[in-house]
Image: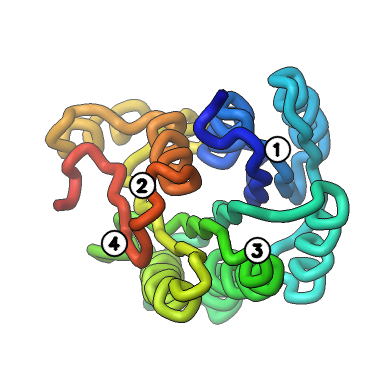
């Protein structure tokens, strides 16, 4: 019996990186997994097959969580297909980095919609079902940047800081219904995105981290397993840092 046996989870943005690692760890722990992807259709189909091999129910949905109606439709479809929803993980996110003086209004708005508004959309859509069940765990992915800021990422940092305030408010509103809401703040995690970067730059980042290495997507996924499971039944409204002591 896995830590998440019998639970149904919805993970947004799961075709690669951290989202994919979360989906795989959830399947390993016995959860039925619904997930979204947007552009990577082939990766989405491959992940569905990979997850199903664990003997759980898995289904991918091509959906844009930053679209209010699409998010509502997505959650309704997941509940219809899986019979309920126990865990919601808002992982979908993008970057549009630039110095503030060069940042366009579009780059600001796009980040706010994809990173922050998507959390509002999916949580609002999932709330009714979770309230009826008097149970649920909501996990929103923020970032170390949302806590300490980062030059060249004013839009991204603001969206991720917004997720923290949103998560804490949701925890206060829904706590009486036994619904928990927490945020996970990854530090420097090595994914397909970082592989494309200059090795010297990446090594410089590693050297600046007390643990002298970047994190693995699985290490963020393990924190998600903990917060999604009954092991964290009295933990709500918190930000769990997964950063190798990069920020304490």
- Which residue sits at x=17%, y=30%? 211
In the shown orientation, is residue 195 left or right of residue 66?
Answer: left
> Which dot, 2 or 4, sits closer to the camera?
2
Nearer-the-camera pick, 202 or 114: 114
Which residue is nearer to you in this view: 247 or 240?
240
Q: Disc 2 marks which residue?
A: 186
Q: Position of residue 42 (x, y in %)?
A: 81, 32
Q: Does residue 8 appear to the left or right of 212 in the view shown?
A: right
**SS label for mark 1:** strand
- Residue 150 circle label: 4
Question: Viewer-nearest of labels 3 and 4?
Answer: 3
Q: Real-space Cα distance between discs 2 and 4?
A: 14 Å
Task: Please determine whether, in this image, residue 63 is positioned above or below residue 109.
Answer: above
* Contact flag, marks 2 and 4 (Cβ < 8 Å): no
Quadrant location of residue 75? bottom right
Question: Would you call the spot at circle 1 few (<14 residues within 10 Å), some (14-19), or many (20 or more)?
Answer: many
Q: Return the disc, 3 or 4, that comes first in the chain's sequence.
A: 3
Q: Earlier in the sequence, mark 1 or mark 3?
A: 1
**Which residue is found at the position 41% from the left and 66% from the top?**
160
Q: Secondary structure at mark 4?
A: loop
Using the image, tell me which numbered label, if any, was put on residue 133.
3
Looking at the picture, how far across and down is residue 8, in whole percent? 68, 45
In three-dimensional space, the C-alpha distance between marks 1 and 4, rounded to whole angstroms, equals 36 Å
Residue 191 in sight from this viewpoint: yes
Return the residue at label 1: 32
Badge 2 density bin: few <14, some 14–19, many ≥20, Cα 10 Å: many
* Label 4 Cα neighbours within 10 Å, binned few <14 / some 14-19 / many ≥20: some
Q: Which is in the foreground here, disc 3 or disc 2?
A: 3
The residue depicted at 79 percent of the width and 24 percent of the height is 49
Disc nearer the start of the sequence (2/4): 4
């Amino acid at each position: 019996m896995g830590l998440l046996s019998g639970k149904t989870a919805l993970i947004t943005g799961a075709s690669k990186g951290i989202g994919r690692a979360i989906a795989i760890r959830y399947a390993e722990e016995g959860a039925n997994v619904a997930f979204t992807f947007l552009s990577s259709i082939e990766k989405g189909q491959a992940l569905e097959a990979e997850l199903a091999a664990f003997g759980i129910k898995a289904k991918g949905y091509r959906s844009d969580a930053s679209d209010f109606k699409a998010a509502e439709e997505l959650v309704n479809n997941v509940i219809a297909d899986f019979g309920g929803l126990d865990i919601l993980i808002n992982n979908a996110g993008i970057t549009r980095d630039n110095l503030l003086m060069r940042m366009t209004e579009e780059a600001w708005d796009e980040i706010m919609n994809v990173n922050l508004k998507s959390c509002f959309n999916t949580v609002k859509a999932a709330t009714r079902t979770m309230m009826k069940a008097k149970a649920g765990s909501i996990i929103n992915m923020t970032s170390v940047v949302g806590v300490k800021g980062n030059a060249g990422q004013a839009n991204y940092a603001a969206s991720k800081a917004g997720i923290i305030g949103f998560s804490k408010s949701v925890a206060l509103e829904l706590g009486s219904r036994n619904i928990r809401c927490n945020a996970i703040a990854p530090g420097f995690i090595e994914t397909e995105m970082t592989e494309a970067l200059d090795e010297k730059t990446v090594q410089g980042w590693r050297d600046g981290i007390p643990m002298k290495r970047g994190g693995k997507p699985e290490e963020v996924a393990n924190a998600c397993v903990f917060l999604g499971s009954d092991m964290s039944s009295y933990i709500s409204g918190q930000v769990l840092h997964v950063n190798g002591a990069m920020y304490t």
